Image: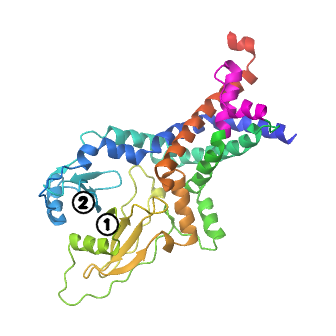
Amino acid sequence: MIRRILFWAHLVAGVIAGLAIGIMCFTGAALAFEKDLVAWAERDARRVTVQADATRLPLAVLGEHVRAFAPDAKPLAITVAADPAAAVTFSLGRDHAVYANPYTGEVRRPASTRMHDFMHVMEDWHRWLALGGDNRPIGKAINGACNLAFFFLAVSGLYLWWPRQFTWRSVKAVALFNGRLTGKARDFNWHNAIGLWTAPILIVLTLTAVPISYRWATNTIYRMAGETPPVSPGPGGAAGPVVAVPPPPPGAKPLTHDALLAAAAQAAPGWESLTLRLGSPNRGPRPGATAAEAPATPPERKGPQAVAVTVREPNAWPRTAATTLSLDPFTGDILRRESQADLSAARQIRGWMRYLHTGEALGFWGQLVAGLASLGGCVLVYTGFALAWRRFVPAKQREG
C-alpha cells in the first residue's frame, strides 16, 4: 500500500514539475564548471607572458592604465594572484572586469564573451526561468517549488528503485544498463539505473538549494544552531561587526595598495590570491533586480575604515573557503582575521550548503559528480515522461 501511494505521488509530482526540473538539471550541468570554463574562454585576457627580467608595476600605475582604458569605470576590487602569469583583475561590477598585465601595464578585455554570456543565460534559467524585472520572484518561486518536488522525487525514487529482493539478478535488473532493451523496457531500465546511482547526489543538490530559494530555510539553520537569524543574510550569512580603526597620528597617510597587499601576504604566507576591496561594500542591486531584491543601504560610517582583503589559499577546506583580513589603512596591522573556522556554526553550515549545491566545496571531483548527476537528472526527466506517456496514452492512440 505504501509503495503504491509513493508510486502515484512520484508519478504525479514528476509530471507536474518535470519540465522545470529538466531545465534546472540541464542548466545545472552547464553551471557546474562555470568559473573554470569562463576562465579558460577568457585566457587571452587573463593570462600574460612573463619575461625573464620582468618586474611588476605598482598597482597605482596599473590603476592609471585602467582609467585610461575605461575612463568611466570605477573599480570595486583588485585581485592579485600568486601565479606570475596571471593578469591583475580590476573588478568593475558584479559581472564586469578588465585585466591588466602587471609587467607592461597593458589593459585588456576578453576578445570574446560568448562563454560568459552563455553562462549568464544558464544562470537566468536556473534561478528565475529566464524571467526578468518584477517577474523574477515568480520564476524563483516556481523553481523553488519544483526543487522541493525534485527532492521528493529523489527520496521516493530511491525507495521505489531499490530492489525488492536483494539478489544479484534483481539488483542487476535495476542497477545496471541493458543495451539490448528497446521501448518501454529501455526507458524503465534507464530510469531505474540512473535514478538509483544519482539519487543520493540529487538529494544533496536539491536539499542544499532550499536555503537559496527560501528565507525560512536559512532562518531554520540559524535557529537549529541556537543563533539569531540575520536581518539580511548573504550566501554565507550575516556580516561581522564593524572593525574599529585606531585614530591615526596627525599627518598620517594611508598606505598604498601594494603595501596593504604585502601586509596581507605576510599574514597568510601560503596565499593563492589576494582581493583588495575598494570603496563601500554596498555595490547596489544586481542588474535587473527588483526593488525588493536590492540590498539595504548601510548607515554612513564616519572616520577611517578598515581595509578588507580576501585571501584564498590552495589547501583551504572547503575548497571555496576564504579568509578575510581587516587591515589598518595607515599601518597595515591586522585588526581582525575571519576564516572559515572563525564563523559561527550557522554561517559555516550555510556556506557549506551554498557550495555543495554546485559541487565547488569539494573541488574538481565535487563539481564533476554534481555535473554528471545533473545530466542524469535530464535523462530521468525524459524517461519519466516517456513512461508516463505510455501509461496514460493507449498504444493505438500513440501509433495513430
* Residue at screen point 52% across, 62% down: 351
Q: In this view, does 168 lie to the left or right of 244?
A: right
In the picture, the disc for residue 277 is 1
Q: Which of marks 2 and 1 is in front?
A: 1
Mark seen at residue 391: none
The reply to whether the C-beta atoms of the residues labelled 2 and 1 are less than 8 Å apart is: no
Please name whichever residue, 165 or 23, is drawn nearer the observer in this view of the structure: 165
Establish if 308 lies above or below 42.
below
For mark 2, give the secondary structure: loop
Region in magenta: 168-196
Q: Is residue 172 magenta?
A: yes
Give 235 or 284, whichever is nearer the viewer. Answer: 235
Q: How is the image coloured?
A: rainbow
Q: Name the residue under label 2.
A: 74
Q: Of all residues shown, which one is farthest toward the top? A: 400
* Residue at (47, 45) in percent of width and height: 32
Give residue 394's quadrant in the image.
top right
The spot of residue 288 in percent (x, y) is 41, 49
User: On the picture, is 353 further left or further right than 194?
Assistant: left
Asked if residue 57 can be seen in this view, the reply is yes
Determine the residue positioned at 49% across, 57% down. Answer: 292
Q: Can residue 130 be seen in this view?
A: no
Q: Badge 1, how many Cα within 10 Å: few under 14, some, many 20+?
A: some
Task: Name the kind of residue labelled 2 in the image.
Answer: Lys
Main SS of the magenta part reads helix
